[in-house]
Image: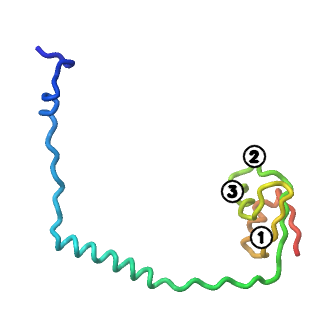
């Protein structure tokens, strides 16, 4: 009698079922389905409007100086400092005074000093 260790490779090969080949789509179905996708993608890209021109700076700027470290702060506060162009104490960044910048300053107001200019 053969034990489990004495089985041969031929015994293992007989037990495996043969792999079935995936059924192929007829060419008419494949070309019709594939032809629709690129046309839809082209139509979507053609329908996009041109990018709006950037607004001219209004002349108002705000100067931000980092006065405290970002170490030990939440990740969103560290990311906001980087977004403001700051990453070390006493670094200064001058940015356009917009609502977006004001919101970022408000997020890290305890870490920065703001000088309006």
Q: Which quadrant is home to the N terminus?
A: top left
Disc 2 crowd rating (10 Å Cα; few below 14, some 14-19, many 20+) is few
Q: x, y (%) of residue 66?
A: 83, 58
Disc 1 crowd rating (10 Å Cα; few below 14, some 14-19, many 20+) is few
Residue in view at x 18 percent, y 55 percent: 22
Work out whether 5 lies above or below 77.
above
Left or right of 117 on screen, residue 31 = left
Q: Which quadrant is home to the C terminus?
A: bottom right
- Residue wearing tag 3: 76
Work out whether 95 lies above or below 6.
below
Question: Which badge, 3 or 1, comes first in the chain's sequence?
Answer: 3
Residue in view at x 78 percent, y 84 percent: 58
Q: x, y (%) of residue 39?
A: 34, 80
State the image quarter where residue 14 is shown: top left
CB under 8 Å between callouts 3 and 1? no
In the orientation shown, which residue stands out farthest toward the top?
A: 1
Whole-number angstrom distance, CA of label 2 to CA of label 3: 12 Å
State the image quarter where residue 3 is shown: top left
- Residue wearing tag 1: 102
């Amino acid at each position: 009698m053969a034990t489990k260790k004495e089985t041969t490779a031929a015994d293992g090969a007989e037990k495996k079922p043969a792999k079935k080949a995936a059924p192929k789509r007829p060419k008419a179905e494949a070309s019709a389905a594939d032809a629709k996708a690129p046309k839809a993608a082209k139509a979507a890209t053609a329908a996009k409007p041109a990018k709006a021109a950037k607004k001219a700076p209004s002349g108002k700027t705000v100067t931000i100086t980092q006065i405290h470290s970002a170490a030990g702060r939440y990740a969103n506060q560290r990311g906001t400092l980087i977004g403001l162009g700051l990453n070390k104490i006493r670094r200064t960044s001058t940015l356009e005074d917009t609502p977006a910048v004001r919101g970022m300053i408000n997020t890290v107001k305890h870490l920065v000093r703001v000088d309006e200019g």
